[in-house]
Image (cartoon, helix red, strand yellow):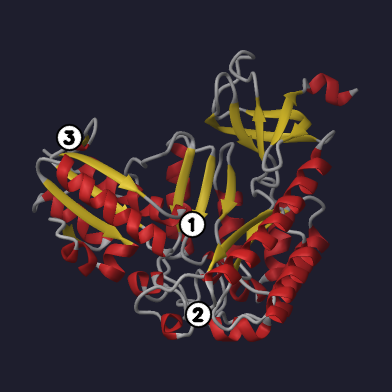
């Protein structure tokens, strides 16, 4: 039986793919090694979202090629979209689709994969990829070349996977996919099944757990926004959190990006959730410096940022990705992109600081999911805002505990909490 070493880069969807690979390998009798030097096979699950990421993936593949005495397998988005890059860099690796990795490592052996197979967890966090692929055709995106169109398992299948995670000890389930908002479009005549799936997970599964929904593009969310908002309002198990990447505040730029949604649709999603939820987190993404982005377009993005006031914002400077339509467009100067990124990033930090400052004095229910520094533990409150309890381990708290805390201060991107006894809450 092989000893394997696996490394994963990129989004939670990629980490979900890694969990499925590991599940198949462990069921086949293989075991994780202490490091690449001790492995019979090293597996690199790659990301290719930015040009810098691509360079990092090639560099890490070269290191693993040198460190691993036996085979190197490269999979993930860069492997599928730009597999030839590894050969061109003289890296001796087998470039494979995610699904093909277990069979390559198993070398013809047949693992027994059943619905009740033991689930691989990352501590108390279970990652549940609900579908593969998306329905978008964004002009700048290379990932679609790796993942293709949406393929959605049934609601029942995903509920059973979620149930297995909870039974295996998951306290937090992270729903992932290239675009969770279009889950079910391929089987449900272009209407999302996400609200039904979330309702079923919360209703049908016994246990103490929370659920976070991963990235969902505004177009998929828009058609089910009322239904989705009601599901969030009805179920305490759901973090009141939506990651809806708008990418630009200009409809002209969105059209050039082929993003499918209009700014008005994004705003209607936000307004609907505002109507149903008193306390929730909006997360979004902006690309600055897209080739057709004029100064007025950038100002529209800045205005949209200030209007919707997301609590979590990812700002990315546009970079050309090989094989995409946007790569053929005449780009903006590096200084222009740098200046626009700086302006938006400064506004982002101001908005995040204000959101966390407003939390101070609030009492929240926090699920602890990971170690911090020293004696601290890190968790998330009802709106999936990060909270650190500095002396958690001294107090006897453990990962997986849910604790009521009073928010005492913040550090712009996370808050600090002090545990509150339930007797005090009743007073």
| 238 and 350: which is toward the camera | 350
Task: Determine contact: label 1, label 3, CB under 8 Å.
Answer: no
Is there any visible trace of residue 115 in the rendered image? no
Q: Position of 303 compared to 260: left or right?
A: right
Q: Is residue 130 left or right of residue 146?
A: right
Numbered tag placed on residue 176 in the rendering: 1
Q: Is residue 363 above or below residue 269?
A: above
Secondary structure at numbered mark 3: helix
Q: Nearer the viewer, residue 306 or 127?
A: 306
The residue that label 3 is drawn on is 37
**Marks 3 and 2, Cα distance to the nearest angstrom?**
43 Å
Residue 14 location, x and y as percent? 39, 55
First in sequence: mark 1 vs mark 3: 3
Picture residue at 34% right of the left edge, 54% below the top: 56
- Left or right? Give the position of 84 relative to 11: left
Which is more foreground, mark 3 or mark 2? Answer: 2
Residue 78, position as x, y percentages in the image = 32, 64
Check residue 385 in the rendering and tell me which mark sits there, or answer none: none
Instruction: Report the mark closest to the observer, 1 or 2.
Output: 2
Position of the N terminus by quadrant? top left
From mark 1 to mark 2, how far is it between C-alphas? 32 Å
Q: Position of residue 348 (x, y in %)?
A: 70, 56
Quickly name the residue at label 2.
Answer: 331
């Amino acid at each position: 039986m092989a000893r394997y070493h696996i490394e994963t880069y990129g989004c939670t969807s990629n980490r979900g793919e890694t969990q499925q690979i590991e599940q198949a390998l462990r069921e086949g009798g293989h075991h994780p090694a202490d490091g690449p030097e001790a492995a019979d096979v090293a597996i690199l699950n790659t990301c290719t979202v930015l040009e810098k990421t691509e360079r990092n993936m090639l560099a890490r593949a070269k290191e693993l090629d040198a460190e691993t005495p036996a085979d190197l397998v490269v999979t993930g988005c860069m492997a599928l979209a730009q597999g030839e890059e590894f050969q061109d860099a003289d890296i001796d690796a087998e470039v494979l689709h995610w699904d093909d990795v277990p069979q390559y490592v198993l070398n013809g052996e047949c693992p027994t994969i059943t619905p009740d197979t033991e689930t691989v967890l990352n501590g108390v966090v279970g990652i549940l990829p609900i579908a593969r692929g998306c329905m978008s055709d964004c002009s700048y995106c290379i990932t679609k070349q790796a993942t293709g169109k949406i393929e959605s398992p049934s609601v029942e299948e995903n509920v059973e996977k979620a149930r297995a995670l909870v039974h295996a000890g998951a306290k937090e389930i992270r729903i992932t996919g290239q675009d969770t908002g279009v889950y079910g479009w391929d089987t449900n005549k272009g209407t999302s099944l996400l609200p039904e799936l979330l309702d079923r997970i919360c209703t049908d599964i016994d246990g103490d757990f929370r659920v976070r929904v991963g990235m969902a593009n505004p177009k998929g969310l828009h058609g089910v926004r009322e239904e989705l908002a009601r599901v969030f309002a009805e179920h305490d198990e759901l973090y009141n959190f939506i990651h809806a990447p708008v990418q630009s505040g200009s409809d002209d730029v969105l059209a050039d990006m082929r993003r499918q949604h209009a700014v008005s649709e994004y705003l209607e999603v936000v307004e609907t959730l505002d109507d149903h939820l008193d306390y929730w987190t909006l997360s979004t993404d902006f690309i600055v410096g897209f080739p057709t982005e004029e100064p007025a377009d950038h100002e529209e993005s800045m205005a949209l940022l200030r209007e919707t006031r997301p609590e979590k914002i990812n700002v990315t400077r546009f970079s050309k990705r090989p094989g995409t339509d946007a790569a053929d467009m005449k780009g903006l100067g590096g200084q222009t992109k740098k200046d626009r990124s700086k302006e938006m990033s400064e506004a982002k930090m101001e908005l995040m600081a204000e959101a966390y400052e407003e939390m101070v004095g609030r009492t929240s229910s926090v699920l602890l999911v990971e170690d911090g520094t020293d004696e601290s533990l890190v968790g998330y409150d009802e709106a999936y805002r990060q909270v650190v309890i500095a002396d958690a381990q001294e107090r006897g708290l453990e990962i997986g505990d849910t604790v009521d805390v009073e928010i005492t201060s913040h550090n712009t991107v996370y808050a600090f909490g002090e545990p509150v006894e339930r007797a005090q809450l009743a007073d």
